[in-house]
Amino acid sequence: MMQSIEEKTVRSLRVHYYGSYVLLGSLFLFVFFRSRRFSETPQPLNMALQQYGILITLAAIPLALKTFANMIKRKRDKERTTQETIIAYKKAFFLRLYLLDCVILGNIILYAISYNQNYAWLTVILFLTLLFCKPSYRELEELIPREKEDEQIA
C-alpha cells in the first residue's frame, strides 16, 4: 500500500520524536534514581548558574513554540507548493524538538552534578512540553495549500 508524502514525513518525524523522548527519558531516569553517578557527593553550583539554568529553561519553552509557529506561517499558504510546505514543516519541527532536547539535556547534566531538585522539576516540565510537540498528520495536512473549489469548477 502506497503512503502519501505527508504520511511518510510524519512517520519519519515521529521516529525522531519518540527516539529523543525515550533516549532523554532513560537518561533522566538513570540519573534520577542514581543508577549513574557522575560524582559521589553532589557538587554545589553557583547561585548565578542555578538562576541562569532556570531562566534559560523558562525562556526556551515559549521560544521553541513561537519559532515553530513563525516558521510554518512565514510565507502565505497559497504561495507554497506541497513540497515547500513539507520542507518548512520539517525544519520547524526539528528546530523545536532539538532546541527543547538541548535544554532537557542541560538540565539533566546539571541535575546529575548537583542533585538540585529544581533541575529535576524543570526536566519534568520540559518533558510535559514535549508531549504537545508530537508531529501530526492532520496538522501537516492543514498547512498544505489546497485549490479553492471555485477554481476547480471553472
Image: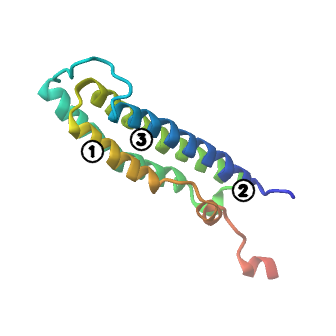
Residue 126 vs 105, above or below: the answer is: below
The CA span between labels 1 and 3 is 15 Å
Residue 80 % position (x, y): 66, 56
Taking 150 as reference, is 10 left or right?
A: left
Q: Which residue is pictured at 32% across the width and 49% down the height?
A: 125
**Mark 1 or mark 3: whose residue is earlier in sequence:** 3
The residue positioned 48% from the left and 53% from the top of the image is 133
Dot 2 surroundings within 10 Å: few (below 14), some, or many (20 or more)? some
Disc 1 residue crowd, few under 14, some 14–19, many 20+, Cα 10 Å: few
Between 137 and 143, the one lying in front of the other is: 137
Q: Amino acid at mark 1?
A: Trp
- Residue identifier under label 2: 7
The crowd level at tag 3 (other Cα within 10 Å; few <14, some 14-19, many 20+) is many
Looking at the image, can residue 85 be seen?
yes
Residue holding disc 1: 121
Alpha-carbon distance for marks 3 and 2? 24 Å
Note whether residue 154 is visible: no
Q: Is residue 114 above or below residue 98?
A: above
Label of residue 100 in the image: 3
> In the rendered structure, are the residues bearing label 3 and label 2 in contact, judged by CB atoms less than 8 Å apart?
no
Residue plotted at (66% across, 62% down): 144
Helix, strand, or loop for circle 3? Answer: helix
